[in-house]
Amino acid sequence: MALLIDRVFPEQKIESMANDDKRDDAAIGAAPAALATTTAESSAIKERRKMKVLICCFGSRGDVQPFASLGRGLQDYGSSSSNTKDMFEFDVLGMTNVNDGVSIFHSLDLKAEGVHFDMAEFLRENPEMKKAMETGNAIQFGMTMSKEFGNKFPKEFVQQWNVAKEFSPDIIISSTLTFLQASAIGQALRIPVIHGDLGMFSFLPISKHTNTELHEPGWLHKPASFVCVSGIIMPYKMKNDDGDTLYGTIRNELSTGPHAILETEHLLGQDGPGQFVREWMNPLTIGLFAISNSVLPKSKFDDLPTLYNERTYWTGNWYVPKSIQEDLAAKGDPNFSSSGEKKNGDKNTGKDTKEIVLEFIESQKKMEGVPPAYIGWGSMVAVSPEHMTRTAVNSLKLAGMSGIVLGGFAKLDIGMLLKDDNETSEDNEERKLLYEYAKNHVLFLQSAPHDWLFPRCSVTVHHGGAGTTAAALRSGVPTIVTPCIADQFDNAALIESSGCGVGFTKPLKNISSQELADSILKCCAVVGDKGDIESSSNMCSNSKRIAITLGEEDGIQNAIQAITTFVTTRLDTGEWEKEFETRLEQRIKRPWGFLYACYRMLFYNSPFEE
């Protein structure tokens, strides 16, 4: 269950957009200029400290790509940094889902092993998951995902453990979805596991500034938040088709060999929700969150436990710089290019994505005076791919605008405008009209680099995934979030509160083409003398202000700095190891039970301060 967080957007001076590409054109993971040394000083560095980093992540492309971007930054750090104090060189391995996940890591020249099932195929093909997404049923979505996760887990964890043992990492960085098994692997190897995540939904700090969406009375807020956070361990407590829990699978696999976990040791979360949330809010290592303080200030959360506040970092977004995205697109990389795909029903003639898009944008600007709108729903499927395609094109037609539509997991394509087994003659005529409109005004692509494409559009329309929302905010143009499920509703509210666009409160399946068309027109209501898009509601000025601030941040460099500081101040000194052993003893001798945790939530002003 997502927490809806109060948003604060401090007023900032609107500056020129002339330096938009400053962050993007810099090498990913590069050290700050203040740390630079001369060539002679750099050559004097004989050997950098080598550290192996295992990155565990799982999910859609939007879930995986930021972690791959962080991995690329770590990998580049050793060669690009001239910081003589740190002297780190990182060897990175991604452990993610097969096909799409591994492919993203490989596109960024990173090693990767596919140890999770194919998320894209599962979302497209599983009937229960398709129904959950089509109807926006979050409970069905979570239960179906948990069931698949549990059934695949025994075989997958064996592979994960084998990969980890062979790679022998010094540190693990893990997303929320893989954190419990990563923590078990870290416990067996006696190495720290750093929690990383992309947004406000999954780290869920228990705070008075959050809203569980359970509509509980104020005095029950902390217990309700506690229940939401403890839900992370529920899939591991459930029995799979083999009759065993995931905790049982982990313990069986880690019970033998040189890294065997003793029977007397307890795993994170094994003692139940009370002890799990106690540890979640008092982390052993640092927490890295790809959140911008300019969008969601950490200072807003003034009631966080001391340890949580000290050890968690709002680093800023983790993304592939525009220059690298453009280079990959030019090379025809399948994750950043649509070269050879269909263009409005016709075959392309070997042109790369950049050339195709630029030609389309210029032709539409000449005809309409404004750039096209972007529409794409990433890994989501609402009602059906045919319905989504019709909604996209019909909303553009009603708004009188051109558009660029990305296929995503649903593989949206102009041909879907003519598909419907139950069509009437009237429906058939309408589809033909939409098809003709699309041939002249809509460009379909299966993929394109967001950070390069979004700023060239008049408005972006998307599902509100964490990565896509961040890219939309960086673009400097208004954005529209049409959420489908889970944290996407939080991101829709984030956009609405920021004044950077429109955030729908209802799911995509219930949004009509007319409503979407009205929102598109609202985001670009007035056309200036030079064809620049201006918004009557100041959406453009707000979007530019936020984009300038985000462009000045280097989330990857900030994350790396937090990692190296943790290594030198807590890992090298033995402080982490000592605290780790104390935590293991706490799980055995003094764990919080469920009822005791609820008692603290109800009657303690600061329930996690001990």
Image: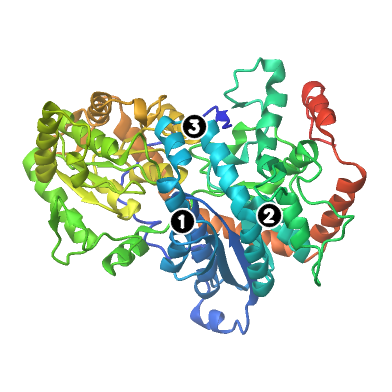
Front residue of this view, candidates 336 and 574: 336
- Disc 1 residue type? Gln
Residue behind mark 3: 490
Quadrant location of residue 432? top left
Whole-Å distance between the Cαs marked 3 and 1?
20 Å
- Disc 3 residue type? Asp
- Residue 295: x, y in percent? 48, 37
SS of the residue under disc 2: helix
Q: Which marked residue is nearer to the observer: mark 1 or mark 2? A: 2
SS of the residue under disc 3: helix
Q: Vertically, is 195 above or below 303?
A: below
**Residue drawn at (30%, 49%) of the image:** 411
Residue behind mark 1: 65
Q: Which marked residue is nearer to the observer: mark 3 or mark 2? A: 2
Residue behind mark 2: 181
Q: Is residue 18 left or right of residue 80?
A: left
**Residue drawn at (43%, 67%) of the image:** 108
Quadrant location of residue 274? top right
User: Of the residues under marks 3 and 2, which one precedes in the sequence?
Assistant: 2
**Residue drawn at (41%, 49%) of the image:** 551
